[in-house]
Image: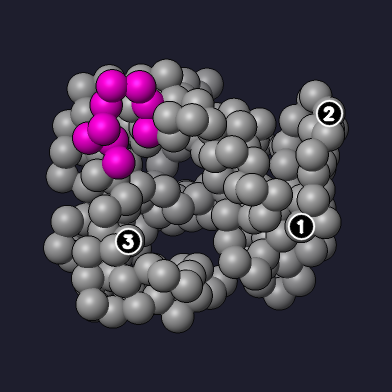
Amino acid sequence: MSKVFSSHAVSVDGYISGRKPDGEHTFGRGLGEASMLFNWYNDGDTPSKVFDGFRLSAPSAQFFDLIADRVGAAVAGRTTYEHSGHWGGDSPHPTAPLILVSHRSAPKLSSKQTLITTGIEDAIAAAKKVAGDKDVALMGGGLLTSALEADLVDEVILHQVPILLGGGHSFFQELPKHVRLRLLEVIAAPGVTHLHYEVIR
């Protein structure tokens, strides 16, 4: 059965971008330090087997590729979609198609992108159908919050980078209830610590 998980780089204080990110300023205006959240993608000597051009440290590459190889479909919310420049009509994953969740139309969708307007439950159901025996990756904090509220998330993976941004776009948004997590593994690597949690139901 497909699992649903989120995997994202975050600062120690829980931010995923600087202040006022948009398609032109992905990491936020005036906070270039936010780009440090993704330096670990290219600060090593080990090429990723899944993402062309990524060169990670050996421990990061092993962990990252295991996670990336699980993905059969990605689901993103409208804010992440816009801030990422629509991924240029592609998907955030090199082989997995994108399911976009939005109540508004998206006129520039490509053949690798599908729009779902009826909510997070239908979007994840559609992604599971596309993913087959692989897993579904969630993109963005708002989407993750909605999926957690709907009790649809199996795992949360945080790539925690040792920086305090002090402001910006927080990954976790307000939830109506506590969500308990079980730590499955911790991978310490140069410039990042990979934290892998299971959602306890």
User: Of the residues under marks 2 and 3, which one precedes in the sequence?
Assistant: 3
Image quadrant where residue 190 sits: bottom left
C-alpha span from label 3 to label 1: 24 Å
Image quadrant where residue 96 sits: bottom right
162 lies above or below 133: above
Mark 1 lies on a secondary structure that is loop
Looking at the rendering, the stretch of residues picked out in magenta corresponds to 27-35
* Residue at point 76%, 57% (across, down): 112
* Residue at point 27%, 26% (across, down): 31
Mark 2 lies on a secondary structure that is loop
32 within the magenta span: yes
Q: Which residue is mark 1?
A: 112
C-alpha span from label 2 to label 1: 16 Å
Which quadrant would the N terminus be assigned to in this image?
bottom right
Q: Which residue is mark 2?
A: 105
User: Of the residues under marks 3 and 1, which one precedes in the sequence?
Assistant: 3
* Amino acid found under the numbered disc labelled 3: Tyr
Percent x, y of residue 125: 79, 51
Query: Badge 3, how many Cα within 10 Å: few under 14, some, many 20+?
Result: many
Q: Is residue 143 visible?
A: no
Query: Badge 1, how many Cα within 10 Å: few under 14, some, many 20+?
Result: few
Comparing 1 with 16, the one in front is: 16
Q: Which residue is mark 3?
A: 41
